Image: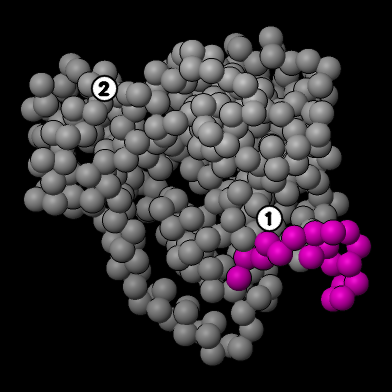
Amino acid sequence: MEIAANRMDRGFYQYQDEFEKKALEILRSGWYILGKEVSFFEEEFAAYTGAKYCVGLASGLDALWIAFKLLNIRRGDEVIVQGNTYIASVMGITINGATPVFVEPDPYFGIDVDKIEEKITNKTKAILVVHLYGVASKMDRIVELCKKYNLRLVEDCAQSHGACFHSQMTGTFGDVGCFSFYPSKNLGAFGDAGAVVVNEKQLADDFRMFRNYGSEKRYYNKVVGANSRLDELQAGFLRVRLTHMRELTEEKIRIAKRYSAQISNPVIQLPKVPEGSSCVWHQYVIRCEERDRLIEYLNGKGIHTIIHYPIPPHLAEAYRYLGHQEGFLPITEHLAKTVLSIPLYNGMLDEEQEYVIQAVNKFR
């Protein structure tokens, strides 16, 4: 049996008729940028998250860097962020000239809240929380710290669509919630797409202006902005998928529960979810001290996996200028050498799940 690390085509076939109908509707409309599909999606996604406003953008990275730009984070400022994240999180900070200050993760892959306050200086202007792998981070104390030190709070929700902490959805705790709708995400488009959610009308208006060349009115440019517009086709596809988010999320939760209940190999460490948090299982990330041998073993059985992520941002060549050496973040670096995402996707067959479970359990 051959099992891909992810199967995005399965998600298409689940609702093929709806996607194709929507595509033809938009193509025949003759309007492809910033039309009714984008407006409707923004309203619907804001309602889904519980935020007041949503602004569609071209990608999750754009959501991050534009967020820090509009929050006036700039050169000389510091932003606290966890070390074990995808490099795009950090790029959102550094594109604006600010400096990332890394914090080690907790046992749930989220930022270790107990280690944040010691990193705060007079240069600290914001905290970036990454809800990694679909696990909602523990937000109560982070919100308190931001209030105590008058810091901006940005949430990277690229992997946490629908995840909650104490029944409040990720993306709604701080100033800006940044979302990616890359095809592999739980709420995925069929190309690049992103959005932010905010509760301040002025900030939402600023995002709308900035995404369209800094223009409030056509050919009248108030600021030097960007071309970062969610297009009509992607917005329409996202609207279709959004109507099915509950069943799509429940399906992933069922598969994850099965893995957690039936994988019983003592050399495999299973993921955990903190009390008060929910997880939407963007990835099911196990840990193994002999990770590379496990990958080779699973490949031999036709089971493909992904490492999220093999090189921590502080050790990436792109951030060599920060001066961090190996050993700077030992927990983060150890995770990079031991984590492994095993197949979990919408439309995954029962026999495929069983095959993965049996293979992982037989690894020695």
Looking at the image, is 89 positioned above or below residue 315? below
Q: Residue 356, percent across and down?
A: 16, 39
Say which residue label 2 marks.
288
Q: Give the residue type that dot 2 points to.
A: Cys
Q: How would you rate the neighbour count of disc 2 (Cα within 10 Å): few for under 14, some for 14-19, many for 20 or more?
A: some
Q: Residue 54's mark? A: 1
Residue at 68% from the left image edge and 62% from the top image edge: 228
Image quadrant assignment for residue 305: top left
* Image location of residue 44, percent across then percent down: 61, 60
Horizontal side of residue 209 vs 106, given as left or right: right
Is 3 in front, or is 320?
320
Identify the residue at image location x=33%, y=45%: 252
Q: Is residue 257 visible?
A: yes
Q: Main secondary structure of the magenta part?
A: loop
Horizontal side of 174 relative to 251 (left or right) equals right
Is residue 128 shown above or below 186? Answer: above
Q: Which residue type carries mark 1?
A: Cys
In the depicted view, which residue is nearer to us: 316 or 211?
316
Which of the 4 image quarters holds residue 153?
A: top right
Range shown magenta: 213-231
Q: Residues within 10 Å of mark 1 (few under 14, many from 20)?
A: many
Q: Marks 2/1: CA distance? A: 39 Å
Question: Looking at the image, which residue is at 39% across and 36% down?
Answer: 308
User: Residue 164, can we see it?
Assistant: no
Q: Earlier in the sequence, mark 2 or mark 1?
A: 1
Q: Secondary structure at mark 1?
A: strand
- Residue at 48% across, 55% down: 182
Q: Nearer the viewer, residue 345 or 165?
A: 345
Q: Is residue 357 magenta?
A: no
Of badges 2 and 1, the one in the foreground is 2
What is the quadrant of the C terminus in the image? Answer: top left
